[in-house]
Every structure is written in structure tokens, then in C-alpha cells.
Amino acid sequence: MRAGGSATAAAGWLDARLLAPDAERGERVVCYASALAGTVLATVLALRAQHTWLPLTVIAVVAFDLFGGTVVNATRSAKRRFHRPGRSWRHHLAFVAAHVQPFALALLVPGFGWISAGLVHALTLAGAACVLVAPADLRRPVAFAVSALAITAATTSVAVPDELAWFAPVLVIKLLLAHLLPER
């Protein structure tokens, strides 16, 4: 196999894992651009806060996942992947629960405490549960209602470092609005 072919295969493999197996070119561009822009923004904020290399790396990785994942989860290809036949509320709730980034930040980033991590994670899980139990025709407005409430509660109830003020809103958007809502 030629080197170009193996690079193309590797890129396809990566796209299938990070985006969706059948992501279109435009979707890939927007998803990676958002991930990169969010990572740069979060990294600049973390550098201004004078974080050392480990918290800086964690913040950059979390930003790549959340800023990119917000867009990924809103694409038609990801909607087909996550809302295909056979997917239940358990799959969606498990996907939300698996997002333990708040605890990674609490563990490795000074100033982001365990109470903040627990509250953000609990608000996101509770919001997901509300969306998933809502009747299908009300899921979209319920998702927006619980997202607005969760973002407000998370950003006003606990202190987080200024450079991480983006974290809870982007996490909530990624999971409650982008992931849980199927394509119409």
C-alpha cells in the first residue's frame, strides 16, 4: 500500500472514531475547525492564568473534546450514529454519564474544586434524565429549558477559575442540546 493510502485510511479511522463513520467533508471541516478554535481559545486563557504543563494539557484536551464534540453531536452523521434503531434512553444517559471531564479538571486543575465538578456533572445528568423522560414532541423545548437552568445554576452556584468559565456551558450544550436531540 502506498503511503498516501495508509494516511487516508488512518484519517478515515480517526474520523470514524471522533466524528462518525460516514461524516461528510463539510462536517469534518466544521467539527475540526471548532475543536481547534476552542482548544486555542481555552489554551490561551489557561496560559494567561499561568497554568503549568499538566493542567494546561488537560484543559486543552477537554476543550478539544467539548468544542469539537458540540459540533460533532449536532451533525447529521452523528445523529444517524447515536439515534439509530436499537439505541435506548440507557445508551444516551450512559453517554452523558461517561463525560467525567469535570472530575479530571477537579483532579488536575488548581481552583476547579470537587464540589464544582460534582455539581456540573449532576446538573448535566439530571438535565439529561429530564430530556429523556419527556414525551418525544416536548424533548426539544425541555432540552432548552433544562440547559438554560443548568448553565445558570452551574455558573452562579460554584466558583470556578475565570479561564474555565466556558466549561459548564459548553458541556451542557454538547450533551443536552447537541447529543440528546435527534435529527428531525
Image (spheres, grey):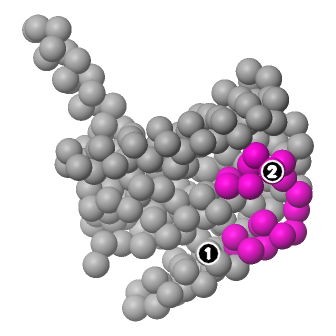
The percent position of residue 91, horizontal first and vertical second, equals 47, 60
Q: Residue at x 61, y 64 (%)?
A: 172
* Residue holding disc 2: 162
The percent position of residue 132, horizontal first and vertical second, equals 52, 77
Q: Is residue 99 magenta?
A: no
What's the CA distance linking mark 1 and mark 2? 21 Å
Task: Please tell me which of labels 1 and 2 falls first in the chain.
Answer: 1
* Residue holding disc 1: 147
Looking at the rendered structure, the kind of residue marked 1 is Ser
- Residue 137 in which image quadrant: bottom left
Q: Residue at x 49, y 42 (%)?
A: 37
- Residue 6 in which image quadrant: top left
- Residue 181 in which image quadrant: bottom left
**11 left or right, relative to 118:** left
What segment is highlighted magenta in the picture? 150-167
The percent position of residue 51, horizontal first and vertical second, equals 80, 29
Q: Main secondary structure of the magenta part?
A: helix
Going by the picture, which residue comes out furthest to the left?
Answer: 1
Quadrant (top left/top right/bottom left/bottom right) for the C terminus: bottom left
